[in-house]
Image (spheres, helix red, strand yellow):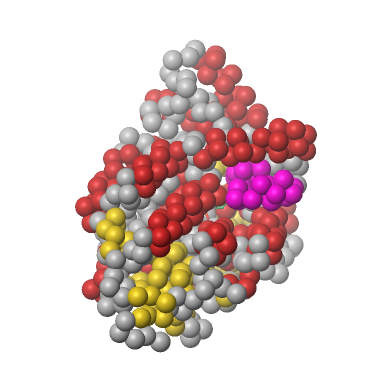
Amino acid sequence: MSTNSEIHLDFDAVVIGAGFAGLGMLRRLRDELGMSVQVYETGDGVGGTWYWNRYPGARCDSESYVYCFSFSKELLQDWNWSGKYPEQPEILSYLNHVADRFDLRRNIQLKTRVISAKFLEDQNHWQIETDQGDCVTAQFLITGVGCISTGNVPEIAGRDSFEGDWYHTGSWPHEGVDFVGKRVAVIGTGSSGVQAIPVIAEQAKSLTVFQRTPQYSIPARHETVDRRFIEEEVKPNYDEILEKARWSKSGFPVDFSERSALEVSAEERQRTYDAAWDNGGMQFIHGTFKDIRTDIKANDTAAEFIRSKIREIVKDPETLEKLLPMDHPYGSKRALIDTDYFETYNRENVELVDIRNTPIQKITPTGIRTEHEEFEFDIIVFATGFDAMTGSFLKMDVRGRNGLTLKEKWTDGPRTYLGIQVAGFPNMFMITGPGSPSVLSNMPVAIEQHIEWISDFIEFLRERGIETAEADVDAETEWVSHVNEVAKPTMFMLANSWYLGANIPGKPRVFMPYAGGIGTYRRKCCDIADNGYEGFILSSGSRKRASMAASS
Ligand code: N01
């Protein structure tokens, strides 16, 4: 309902997605800013990534005590993780607990996909439509659609002719999959594949892994959580621990090494790598040497160490040869940690097919045919990743000023200011959008930084009666070149990875996340806010707005 002088909006803000980002944003806007908020979520439950990714072995690579929200001291003290790394069912329970504890569900509409969002220029607000027939208006549109949430099932010839069952790791059936007695294929050896393969191998009659790129991976050394560490060292010091994570390079409260791999003796280097391998986890990439991500010679020392470990583990010489990563530096693709990944290839029921040398020709009704062989399967698992960072945005019809679509705007790759806003799309805020550290950080730390910064910005706008905030196109251009500059000297540019969009045929090859570190990025965001939100065009419209009171 609108009149010339007054516009009635359905909501102050619409949030898309009910994962970590959407839940946190809803709580903050509704309970701290008193805004009316509607969340739309495609799934029939909350949880985002952790709702969909239920494949066997799914868990997070961040240690559990830092994979959480930090906004509630009581929540931090009350919640007890059971594993060193949080497992998917437990993360999902945690997010459901958050939804219940903070009474979030009443503003979340499940089983509802946002199909379009249009900025109505004459009225300075967004109109959002869903696949359930909703058509609502809101001053702010906030996306919490996830960075790795639109699955990539490659269009291999004959894919739809397969008569067995097939699954993508990113949309796993809730009732689970029974592999017992089954001949199973897994295509893909990224984070998902490396986690799923050892677990599936234990259950299946046979497992054939189709590998395009061999991986570097470090043992996770997953175990039950160290209760003494949590009760005596973490819980009493949570504030300091989380503050350290917030200003760190990658969202973890760890000390990064200041030593160069090239300035220590070979013995010292070996000792350092051995200790990190034995301790397991991300310490190998963060805590060994400062230059393994920036200097190819330093990187070679780490890469060769990992190859030496793979050689120690894998017994069959032919399989070993296929598993040795030789074509890209360590850490140029997402760093992996695993549980018995390489050991799994010593099992009698596991076979590895190198599809670089013998590409898949087609999927047949009964299995997979490569150039050299025909395989029969009951189940094919696609662990083939995601159309990351932009896929979930471009699935929706998002239109800004002059009817420009986000798809048109991002034809040559995503363009954003801070990974938070897009010029020409006023009042649309992205939580962990392309151009922000997001996937290069422990995700909850990156997500919360955006939730806080965006909601502070919205509060600033509301207090001053400013109707729209919009990234300035020059600020956006500068940010895009800064993101590129920062990525240039890193190893990330030396591999075909989803960070670069290289996994999706036809996707522009652009490095999408900000590689300068979450702490540095946070500082930049704070400075921009302190300078009156420089780089944003702020406009006060002439219309009076009557918005709903905070949701009841
Ligand atoms: O996907 P990926 P993912 N034919 O893109 C192969 C997060 N995550 O789901 O390397 C054959 O990494 C592809 O080969 P190549 C994490 O950020 C976190 O595993 O492109 N193969 C690769 O081997 C992660 O990085 C956690 O040559 C094809 C695999 O499939 C991100 O999600 C757990 C192919 C895809 O690997 C994505 O991980 C899980 C094709 N056409 C995920 N297309 C944890 O925290 C692709 N591949 C533990």
Q: Quadrant of the C terminus?
A: bottom right
Q: Is residue 404 visible?
A: no
The reply to whether residue 329 is in sight is yes
Residue 480: x %, y % from top left: 28, 49
Q: Position of residue 335 (x, y in %)?
A: 51, 41
Residue located at (47% from left, 22% from top):
258
Image x and y of residue 137, in percent: 42, 78
Nearest to the observer: residue 194 or residue 157: 194
Q: Which residue is at the front of the view, 506 or 109?
A: 109
Q: Is residue 540 left or right of residue 279?
A: left
View extreme (right): residue: 228
Q: In this view, does 64 lie above or below 432?
A: above
At 38% from the left and 28% from the top, the residue drawn is 295
User: What residue appears at the point 44 percent right and 64 percent down from the top-left corner?
Assistant: 142
- Residue in the foreground of this view, choosing between 251 and 361: 251
User: Magenta region: which residues?
Assistant: 61-81
Q: How many labels, in total? A: 0
Quadrant holding the N terminus:
bottom left
Q: Where is residue 367 in the image (x, y as percent from the top left)?
A: 56, 67
Q: At 55% across and 38% down in the image, what residue appears?
A: 243
Residue 55: name its quadrant: bottom right
Please give left or right for residue 461 compared with residue 275 in the image.
left
Q: Quadrant of residue 236?
A: top right
Instruction: Give above or below for 4 relative to 77.
Output: below
Residue 72 falls within the magenta-colored stretch: yes
